[in-house]
């Protein structure tokens, strides 16, 4: 006798049975019908994250641009991760962002319960020989970057610094947060390659502390800041002309400042342009998110998928606009490629970039 085995109306197989075996076949069919939907619903990533929380480590202090991005991004990111884990933002400033990166590299759990959002300059610190940067950025699992941005120098409106010519002829006192951070490397680069007269006062915890110091008159400005950071944390500065922008540290002019030159425009030869290209690479992966090395590939893939879903989520886009956050999706694969390309640059270009930034924490 031949029976047609169907599960949920779907023909699975023709089953030949001996007489009196029909009941066993029907029981088999019933068992399969109960098992298949359960298997189809099983999601190991969702099972792992359900009821858990993710610690999201920021290399910056509270109140700045990184915190603004993380707080806006976290709830939407959580909703797109299977299992919808809570995301708890934790600030870990220090060493220009290197402290957080060392934690993520060596200490943090490698199971998907800890992620990082680090200064975009930090992954390049080992390339330049920063002694404290004992990690390999290429081994990190890059989930994606929330933005690509334009770097600028900003000077408080009473500082007397307004144009590129002013940077070449006047002392400009800016704040910094540690060797390896753009707030210190970019001013040194401008001094070395172009002859500006920028003086860095180091020791600030992050960009927000530097902005507060500008408002108090302790320092005159900041170099290596980002347009996106100022728009999110100090939305009145640009429209109310609280700050001047004498130079854009970028390859192309931002539409917000069409009359302000870029460093790439001012470069006089091909070698200088190559050095600048390397030094500006972090801006192409602004606000990068990572998972520690050793995180299971399946979890990394799920996080990358959730990252993409968040970046195109109309609700997140609307929230970003409300909070004046510039967003531009850079995939995790693209972030990894930017880093690989940078680390593959000729040694003489890397050395020239390091020398231009006067990285005092380097191995030389």
Image (spheres, rainbow, N blue to C red):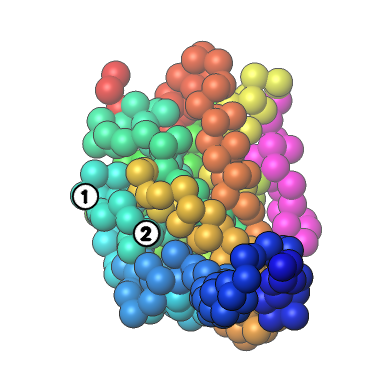
- The residue where tag 1 is placed is 107
Q: Looking at the figure, which quarter contains the N terminus?
A: bottom right
Q: Secondary structure at mark 1?
A: helix
Image height of 305 relative to 72, above or below: above
Above or below, comparing residue 62 to residue 246 in the picture:
below
Write the residue at 31% across / 52% down. 110
Could you tell me residue 278's position as x and y percent?
57, 32
Counting from the top left corner in percent of width and height, residue 114 is at 33, 61
For the record, the magenta segment spans 251-268
| Left or right of 4, for residue 56 | left
| Residue drawn where x is 31% and y is 32% of the image | 130
The quadrant the C terminus occupies is top left
| Residue in front for this viewpoint, 170 or 325 | 325
Give the distance between the C-alpha atoms of the residues marked 1 and 2, in whole angstroms.
Answer: 13 Å
259 drawn magenta: yes
Residue 59 in sight here? no
Q: Identify which residue, 56 or 235, lies in the foreground.
A: 56
- Which of these two is toward me, 55 or 70? 55
- Location of residue 281 in the rendering, given as x and y in whole percent from the top left corner: 58, 40
Residue 112: which numbered mark, if any?
A: 2
Query: Mark 1 packing: few (<14 Cα in 10 Å), some, or many (20+)?
Result: few
Residue 359 among magenta residues: no
Main SS, magenta residues = loop
């Amino acid at each position: 006798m031949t029976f047609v085995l169907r599960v949920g109306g779907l023909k699975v197989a023709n089953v030949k049975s001996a007489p009196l075996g029909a009941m066993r076949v029907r029981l088999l069919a019933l068992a399969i019908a109960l098992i298949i939907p359960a298997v189809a619903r099983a999601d190991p990533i969702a099972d792992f994250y359900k009821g858990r929380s993710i610690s999201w480590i920021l290399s910056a202090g509270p109140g700045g641009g990184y915190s603004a991005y993380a707080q806006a991004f976290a709830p939407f990111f959580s909703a797109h991760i299977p299992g919808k884990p809570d995301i708890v933002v934790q600030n870990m400033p220090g060493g220009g962002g290197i402290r957080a990166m060392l934690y993520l590299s060596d200490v943090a759990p490698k199971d998907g319960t800890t992620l990082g959002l680090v200064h975009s300059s930090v992954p390049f610190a080992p390339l330049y020989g920063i002694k404290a940067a004992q990690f390999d950025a290429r081994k990190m699992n890059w989930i994606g970057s929330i933005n690509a941005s334009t770097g600028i120098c900003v000077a408080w409106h009473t500082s007397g610094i307004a144009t590129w010519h002013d940077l070449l002829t006047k002392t400009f006192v800016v704040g910094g947060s540690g060797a390896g951070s753009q707030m210190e490397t970019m001013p040194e680069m401008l001094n070395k390659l172009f002859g500006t007269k920028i003086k860095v006062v180091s020791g600030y915890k992050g960009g927000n502390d530097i902005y507060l110091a500008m408002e108090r008159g302790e320092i005159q400005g900041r170099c290596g800041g980002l347009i996106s950071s100022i728009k999110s944390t100090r939305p009145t500065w640009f429209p109310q002309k609280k700050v001047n922008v004498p130079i854009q540290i970028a390859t192309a002019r931002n539409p917000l400042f069409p009359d302000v030159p870029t460093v790439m425009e001012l470069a006089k030869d091909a070698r200088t342009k190559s050095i600048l290209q390397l030094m500006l690479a972090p801006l192409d992966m602004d606000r990068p998110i990572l998972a520690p090395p050793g995180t299971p590939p399946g979890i990394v893939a799920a996080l990358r998928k959730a990252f993409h879903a968040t970046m195109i989520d109309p609700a997140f886009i609307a929230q970003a606009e409300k909070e004046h956050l510039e967003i531009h999706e850079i995939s995790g694969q693209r972030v990894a490629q930017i880093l690989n390309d940078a680390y593959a640059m000729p040694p003489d270009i890397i050395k020239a970039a390091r020398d231009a930034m006067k990285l005092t924490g380097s191995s030389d």
